[in-house]
Image (tube, rainbow, N blue to C red):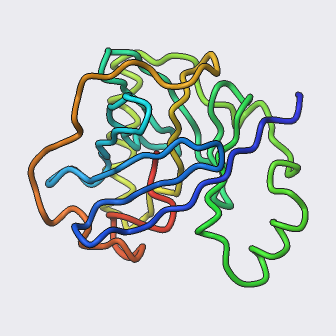
Amino acid sequence: MNRPEEIGYADELLADGTVHRRYENGLEEWRRRTSGHPHLVHWHDNRGASGTDELLGDRIIKRSLADGTVTYARDIGYGRTLWARGEKVLVNRSSFGGRMGVLLAGLGVATLAITAAQLPPLSMSPEQEEALRQQQAQAQQSGGGGGDSGGSGYSDDGSEGSEGSGDGSGDGNDWDANWDGEGDAWNDDDFG
């Protein structure tokens, strides 16, 4: 497998509880949780795209763009999320801390082995998605975590973003209640 393109990003929690994500390639996203659905993030970016990121289970993230396009990613750990069938790896620079962060930054995170088993699916049926949602719900009920991940403005073919028409607005004010990573809401590497 070729070495994936590495794109770093950092998250900033804003006073209104939303997140401003800045990518090293100039892309910026404004992200917010949906009240009552801790595994769904609405976003819009500085390039006109918008949509949702949903953590399905088994560390799979479903990105739905406002135009109906769907793509998948997989959280592969250490603040890394694999997109575009392994062509891009997003790296959460704000999640690195302590000795592990220094070690990974020194190595270049993308140099860690990426296996075929870590690749996100190209497509999924509604039944497969629902099975992963159920798996995620069971993991939450038994005290398991949802895993970290990162989003991108990239589709499965590696092209940037998509024309979007949503403004990313919605309701709910309690979605950031666990931003610090405790519980089953936000953690250091919110998904997508």
Instruction: Indicate whether 180 appears above or below 110.
Output: below
In the rendered view, does 104 fall on the left or right side of 23? right
Given residues 84 and 128, the one toward you in this image is: 84
In the rendered view, does 73 fall on the left or right side of 67? right
In the rendered view, does 86 fall on the left or right side of 130? right
Locate the N terminus and report the quarter of the image it occupies: top right
Q: Residue at x 67, y 71 (%)?
A: 96
Instruction: Indicate whether 19 appears above or below 58.
Output: below
Q: Residue at x 47, y 46 (%)?
A: 28
In the image as oriented, which residue stretches furthest toward the left? Answer: 171
In the image as oriented, which residue stretches furthest toward the bottom? Answer: 98
In the rendered view, does 97 fall on the left or right side of 165? right
Q: Residue at x 81, y 76 (%)?
A: 102
Given residues 140 and 81, the one toward you in this image is: 81
Q: Residue at x 38, y 18 (%)?
A: 163
Q: Position of residue 185 (x, y in %)?
A: 32, 63
